[in-house]
Image (tube, rainbow, N blue to C red):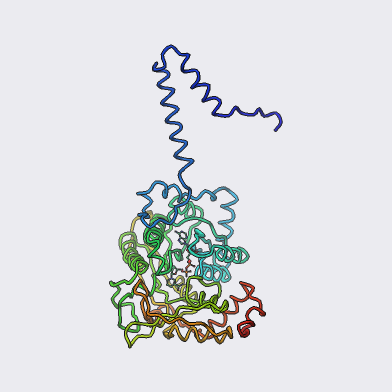
Amino acid sequence: MSQMKPEKPLHHHHSRLLTRWPHHSNPYSPFSKLLFWSFCALSLFLAFFLLTPNSPSPNLHSTGDPSQNPSLRRSLRTTNWGGPAWEKKVRSSCRVRRSPNGLTVLVTGAAGFVGSHLSATLRRRGDGVLGLDSFNDYYDPTLKRARQAFLEKAGVFVVEGDINDAALLKKLFDVVPFTHVAHLAAQAGVRYALQNPGSYVRSNVAGLVSILEAAKSANPQPAIVWASSSSVYGLNSRVPFSESDRTDRPASLYAATKKAGEEIAHVYNHIYGLSITGLRFFTVYGPWGRPDMAYFFFTKDILKGKPITVFEGHGSAHTVARDFTYIDDVVRGCVAALDTAGKSTGSGGKKRGPAPLRVYNLGNTTPVPVSELVNILEKLLKVKAVRKVVKMPRNGDVPYTHANISLAERDLGYKPVTDLQTGLKRFVKWYLDFYSVKKEAVKEHGGLATE
Ligand SMILES: NC(=O)c1ccc[n+]([C@@H]2O[C@H](COP(=O)([O-])OP(=O)(O)OC[C@H]3O[C@@H](n4cnc5c(N)ncnc54)[C@H](O)[C@@H]3O)[C@@H](O)[C@H]2O)c1
């Protein structure tokens, strides 16, 4: 190291060039001009690369279309992947430990709530599993990192990257012949679309296309199982919601992007012979859940003694109610969808025959009023909630969801077995453990039910 000569600073060299100009007989000589313009071009080039931000900031006016936005396009190139050590980790995570029917599954959104549970369950069963997640900060990324650490222990490697990064997807499919993709990565949440609509278009529309493009070009083509949502039923008032009901009146941008996803799935099935199953989840809850969902932030606020806002419906006939579905039930539905997915028929981007295209409701079939959800939480936490009851704003939420699951029962053997009381008890136990809520702190407000 000591033998290395310190380099001259650039500015010193430049100032010499500039100060020599006056001594030239003609400062406008072709050589000087060439030098001057080369210098300008180099400066511009450097300024562009140094000043362009690395990651897309949430921008209300962003089109979200990487092809229209060079900075976004560049930012999607994830840099921390590739190389022999990385490939070894990918391969080892995908090693199948059961035969003869072991799957090799790429799980997108693996650091998310449903994705982490599904990845762990598949790996426990002996399937090969590789996770992919951008670890974005829509909600606290430390929770996503904790799920990642948990998965790492279970033998699942979660690659950090964006589903819009075509080069990364191509690399993953080059390294691993995935039999299935469980595509769960998405911008979730209904109300956040008012602040950041671009993120829904980027992840739920462009991102889905990016995944399907990679899958259709892969050889062999994997079968796709992906998360749609009960929100596609929108203003539908026929209950319970059946797969054959209208889904052309979404009430939020989130719902519209999921509905768009179902149409896009039709296209890729029709043109390329991809086997695609869409799962319409109904309000999934449980341990390791999502902090932006009511059961989660109600728990947090009730424990702090903070008032919670409980919505009530507009018409006299409607209480606000949800068909809350416990995570383990949903995961069983996802696994069954993977196990029963017929094969994709295309190869090399060409369709060779018809492939399955399926859509299923995964709900619980027992809608519970949100006021009852709060009653249960009060009992479990032994803390009285401070309720502020207000009319539900008309900004995306629907008042009522109720799943008809007979199709999933018939084809997937899907049968939810967890009632809200039981599921919330498990959630509360996890919450108190994970956030190390001290017994004493809870007792200040009345006591602790689950230990
Ligand atoms: N939880 C529910 O109640 C519910 C209901 C209906 C539908 N869904 C759908 O189920 C799926 C999973 O939901 P969840 O509750 O686990 O949500 P989640 O937010 O916990 O998980 C989604 C994960 O995807 C990742 N992600 C987002 N955009 C990405 C991108 N562009 N590239 C790579 N990773 C990206 C996020 O970082 C996150 O970890 C989503 O598609 C969601 O829309 C969930």
How far across and down, in percent of the image, does residue 320 sit?
39, 82
How far across and down, in percent of the image, does residue 380 sit?
57, 85
How far across and down, in percent of the image, does residue 71 sit?
42, 47
Query: Which of 141/59 is in front?
Result: 59
State the image quarter where residue 346 is shown: bottom left
Residue ID at (38%, 53%):
348
State the image quarter where residue 127 is shown: bottom right
Q: Is residue 7 above or below residue 259?
A: above
Left or right of 225? Residue 2 is right
Query: Which of 216/204 is in front?
Result: 204
Q: Is residue 19 visible?
A: yes
Query: Which of 203/214 is in front?
Result: 203
Count of numbered marks: 0
Q: Quadrant of the N terminus?
A: top right
Q: Is residue 56 above or below residue 387?
A: above
Residue ID at (52%, 24%):
15
Q: Is residue 413 visible?
A: no
Q: Residue lying farthest right? A: 2
How far across and down, in percent of the image, does residue 53 sit?
47, 47
Query: Which of 19/96 is in front?
Result: 19
Q: Quadrant of the C terminus?
A: bottom right
Left or right of 301? Residue 275 is left
